[in-house]
Amino acid sequence: MSGGNKRIERLCIFLHSGSYDRVYQAMAITNVVLATGGEVYLFFSYGALKRLVKGSLDAVVIEGEAVAPFKEDIERNLNRGTLDKISEMLDMAKRFGRIKVYACTASMAVMNIARDELDPVVDASMGLVSFLNLVKDADQTLYI
């Protein structure tokens, strides 16, 4: 990359929020890193974990203030095809390879979500300690 910026070899993202815009942003960053040859590890917990329940990947759930107008904007752009669905972004990431999607086992327990309820996009469920072992070798770690 120009300007002396180091290319990200390994990115770890802790996804806590299930808000569509935040998960969308995480997937956009993920696909850029994958497209430039890096590897990405995603760790879904709490609100983000709900998105991994079968049939929920593309639900337009928005957290925070001004929910109604923002939700309408996202839905309009999804319907127009000017905004990718999260499921499409995950499919693209999986085609690149070098990505692993993990569900937080503690969040699964707290939220009573069984492993068989999760979308097949999930590679494995793991605890925070195990994910932190991946993070220690990451070039960059994000909490979204």
Image: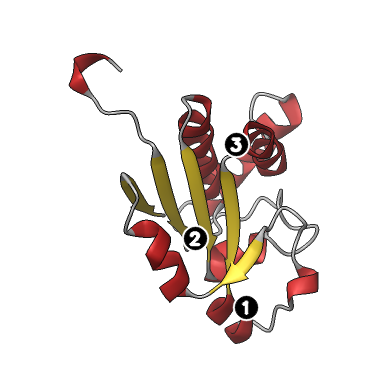
The secondary element bearing badge 2 is classed as loop
Which residue is disc 3 drawn over?
A: 73
- Give the residue displayed 36% in from the left and 35% down from the top: 8
How packed mark 3 is, by other alpha carbons closer than 10 Å (few <14, some 14-19, many 20 or more), is few
Q: Residues within 10 Å of mark 2 (few under 14, many from 20)?
A: many
Residue lying farthest top? 2
Question: What is the CA distance from the residue labelled 3 to the residue labelled 1?
Answer: 31 Å
- Is 142 on the left or on the right of 117, as rendered? left
Q: Quadrant of the N terminus?
A: top left
- Residue at mark 1: 108
Q: Earlier in the sequence, mark 2 or mark 3?
A: 2
Label 3 or label 1, whichever lies nearer to me, is 1
| Marks 2/3: CA–CA distance | 19 Å
Pair 2/3: label in front: 2
Residue sitting nearer the eye, 94 or 109 = 94
Q: Amino acid at mark 3?
A: Asp
